[in-house]
Amino acid sequence: MPKQRSKRALRKRVKLTGRGHLRRHRAYKSHILTKKTTKRKRALDMPGLVSKADQKNVAAMIPYK
């Protein structure tokens, strides 16, 4: 039986935490930053977690992590 393949793009974007949660970066931080408040931009720097609804699907795309 062949090995499963990871989705390479997802592997670069998601990390596994010590407790087994999936950590991700937040969206909306790449452009049009002038209209966003400093507080909002700072909050977007903080990593987020993959939502519970998506966790199963995302974990299946990176089987060896």
Image (cartoon, rainbow, N blue to C red):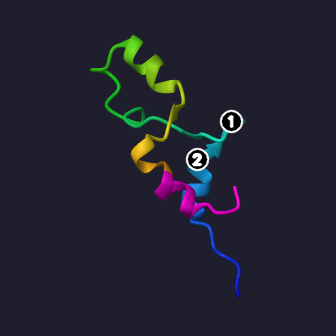
Query: 18 and 25: which one is in front?
Result: 18
| Residue 28, horizontal then vertical, whole percent | 37, 34
Q: Secondary structure at mark 2?
A: strand
Q: Quadrant of the C terminus?
A: bottom right
Q: Residues within 10 Å of mark 2 (few under 14, many from 20)?
A: some
Q: Residues within 10 Å of mark 1 (few under 14, many from 20)?
A: few
Counting labels gives 2
Q: CA distance from mark 2 to mark 1?
A: 14 Å
Would you place residue 53 above or below residue 38 in this image? below
- Number of the label disc, if any, that sits on residue 19: 1
Residue type, label 2: Val
| Direction from residue 26 to residue 61 in the image, left or right | right
* Residue at 47%, 17% in the rendered image: 42
* Residue at 33%, 14% in the rendered image: 37
Question: What is the span of residues highlighted in magenta in the rendered image?
Answer: 56-65
| Residue 35, horizontal then vertical, whole percent | 27, 20
* Residue at 39%, 46% in the rendered image: 53
Q: Which residue is mark 2?
A: 14
Which mark is in front, 2 or 1?
Answer: 1
Q: Is residue 59 magenta?
A: yes
Query: 33 and 7: which one is in front?
Result: 7
Query: 34 and 13: which one is in front?
Result: 13
